[in-house]
Amino acid sequence: MINDTLRKDLITHKVYSSWQFIEYTEKNIATVHYCADTINNIISKMSMKTVRWQQDVVADFVDDVTADGKKVKRLSVTTDNSPVYELRVAGEKVDPWFLFDKLLRDFFQYTMNAFDSISQIINSGLLANNGKKLIL
């Protein structure tokens, strides 16, 4: 959280418009952190599910005897026994790949928004006392 000293400093120097951009930057960065944390959680859950599936596959090896009497182990991996990746969001089943893609796009969008807000802070700070009049 941004401290009140900065806000008072901006008021003292008559840089009033910067405060809104500081708040936007803080919110954008918080959203970036949320997206990154959620992406990590999705990857972790999918990895755990994959490990469990691999363990189940190993347990499913079947002893078999070939026509010439040799003992072999056989396994059939099909779409029926492949892992199903789905998450629940607000009580609805959601494809984790869709959610991953959405959060990744949001991560980069909010990162760009934060940099844009930082640029606005700089602009308003630099031009605060020497603003140019708008020519129409």
Image (cartoon, grey):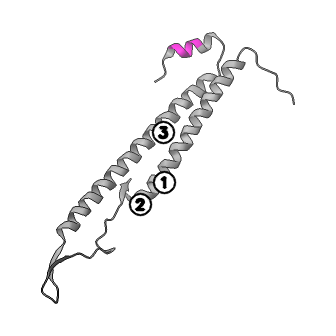
Give 36 or 9, whichever is nearer the viewer: 36
Q: Is residue 21 above or below residue 64?
A: above
Q: Residue at x 36, y 51 (%)?
A: 43
User: What is the span of residues highlighted in magenta in the rendered image?
Assistant: 5-9
At which x and y percent is residue 45?
31, 52
Residue 1 spot, x, y in % from top left: 46, 24
Name the quarter where the C terminus is drawn. Answer: top right
Estimate how packed mark 2 is, as few (under 14), some (14 to 19) or many (20 or more) residues with alpha carbons within 10 Å.
some
Q: Where is residue 44 in the image (x, y as percent from the top left)?
A: 33, 49
Query: Residue at 16% across / 90% down in the picture?
Result: 67
x 48%, y 54%: residue: 101
Q: Which residue matches tag 2?
A: 95
Q: Tell me, yes or no, if residue 45 can be seen here.
A: yes
Report the amino acid beneath label 1: Asp
| Mark toward the start of the polypeptide (1 vs 2) | 2
Say which amino acid is labelled 3.
Val
Which secondary structure, mark 2? Answer: loop
> Sequence-wise, which precedes: disc 1 or disc 3?
3
Residue 91, can we see it?
no
Residue at which label 3 appears: 32
Q: At 44% from the left edge and 53% from the top edge, which residue is drawn? A: 100
Q: Which of marks 3 and 2 is nearer the N terminus?
A: 3
Left or right of 104, for residue 20: right
Residue 118 image offset from top left, x and y in percent: 60, 28
In the figure, 53 relative to 76: above or below?
above
Q: For mark 1, what is the residue?
A: 101
As measured in the structure, the alpha-carbon distance from the residue carrying label 1 to the one carrying label 2 is 10 Å
